[in-house]
Amino acid sequence: MLPRKILHLDLDAFYCAVEELRDPTLKGKTFAVGGRPDQRGVVASCSYPARRLGVRSAMPMSQAVRLCPELLIVSAHFSEYHTVSAHVMAILNNLTPLVEQISIDEAFLDVSLLRDDAERIARGLQAQINRQCGLPASLGVASNKLVAKIANNLGKAGARGDLPPNAIKVIPPGTEAVFLAPLPTRELWGVGPKTAEALARLGIHTIGDIARWPQGDLVRRFGKHGAELAERARGLDDRPVEPESESKSVSNETTFAQDIADSATLQRTLRTLSDKVGRRLRKVGLQGTTVKLKLRWSDFTTLTRQVTLPHATHHDEEIYQSVLDLFQRVWIVGRPVRLLGVGVSGFEQEARQLGLWEQPKVKAEQSSLESALDKLRDRFGDRVIQRGSDLLDEDL
């Protein structure tokens, strides 16, 4: 049986790359995409010049500015990111139907049925994304997902200078274990800080050390996870590329500039978030049965609650009423809230937009209204039409 040809694609500093398309003067600049430092903003993405100075994604923006006082802060444009991502994913799906989208800027591809060798396919794909989308893209090429992902990580890490990596790293079939052997254990999927510490106490510091360790002892010490570690350390991974896992959930959340204890403001926030989630679901043709609430108190304690509906939905009102009920069950009156989030998951296997004649009259009218509002917002922006209650809310 011939080895598979698996590609792992990662769009380099994706949000920043899109912002550079929007504003070419940002190219080569030290900038970050995210929220304002005086409003508890975080770094969603940062340019490579900013990374050289220690700025990292998920870092509080206030810390990023302390590290890099000259840092330019650019507001995120998520609708644009989703549009550009869809363009890239369309290119991938035109190449092969076996595309597993992991996130907005990352995907696996199985190109085993294509005639060209894997490296040539990767270089052609990279050139096409560079040319048609104006985006840098790095790829790892290997016989399985595990090694392709690690190859891409190392290819990107090996880039020098202030330009995006736009790298390609190829691991020929049969060399997987040799490639992995000198890498630290933390590079291996399934090895987190605690497992790495436990391995280090045994004198295991590299992936090669794991591969040489008796598998039976790993199983005795780590159970089923030990057997998985032994296989992965030898570069073995037979997981298929699964297109149907492309979308697990659709969610939206907001962190308040100041902790909020006002019930009306919190409910307006849930309404706005529900509307955004509903719109995104309709845009990609999905309906879900599980509605989820995320709430973070002022002391950073975070809780999640969810409810399963008797039917799948993509309607703003149904999402809002479900998440509002969850909120009212857990919120302690007067207790300040730092963050709220709304999500929908549990998608139908073949979710689709029902025709109006297939729905009750109320649902038909609701769908018509939502469709009209979606078109207006797509054309003129999110704030072209707002609920009257939203006009009172300055926190979103």
Image: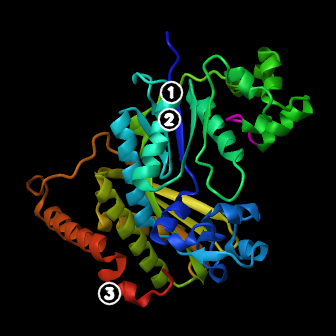
For residue 267, which quarter of the picture?
bottom left
Callout 2: SS: helix
x then y, percent, for residue 286: 31, 51
* Front position in the image: 190 or 221: 190
Q: Earlier in the sequence, mark 3 or mark 2?
A: 2
Q: Which residues are magenta?
A: 188-192
Mark 2 burial class by Cα count in 10 Å: few <14, some 14-19, many 20+:
many
User: Residue 68: which disc?
Assistant: none
375, above or below 184, in the image: below
Callout 3: SS: helix
For mark 1, what is the residue? 118
Three-letter amino acid code at disc 3?
A: Gly
Residue 223 lies in the magenta stretch: no
x then y, percent, for residue 247: 42, 46
The answer to whether residue 143 is left or right of residue 298 is left
User: Residue 122: which disc?
Assistant: 2
In the image, farthest residue toward the bottom: 392
User: Residue 388: which disc?
Assistant: 3
- Check if mark 3's residue and mark 2's residue have beta carbons within 8 Å: no
**Nearer mark to the viewer, of 1 and 3:** 1
Residue 190 lies in the magenta stretch: yes
* Front position in the image: 236 or 170: 170
Callout 1: SS: helix
Three-letter amino acid code at disc 2?
A: Ala
168, above or below 114, in the image: below
- Gap in Å between the C-alphas at discs 3 and 2? 51 Å
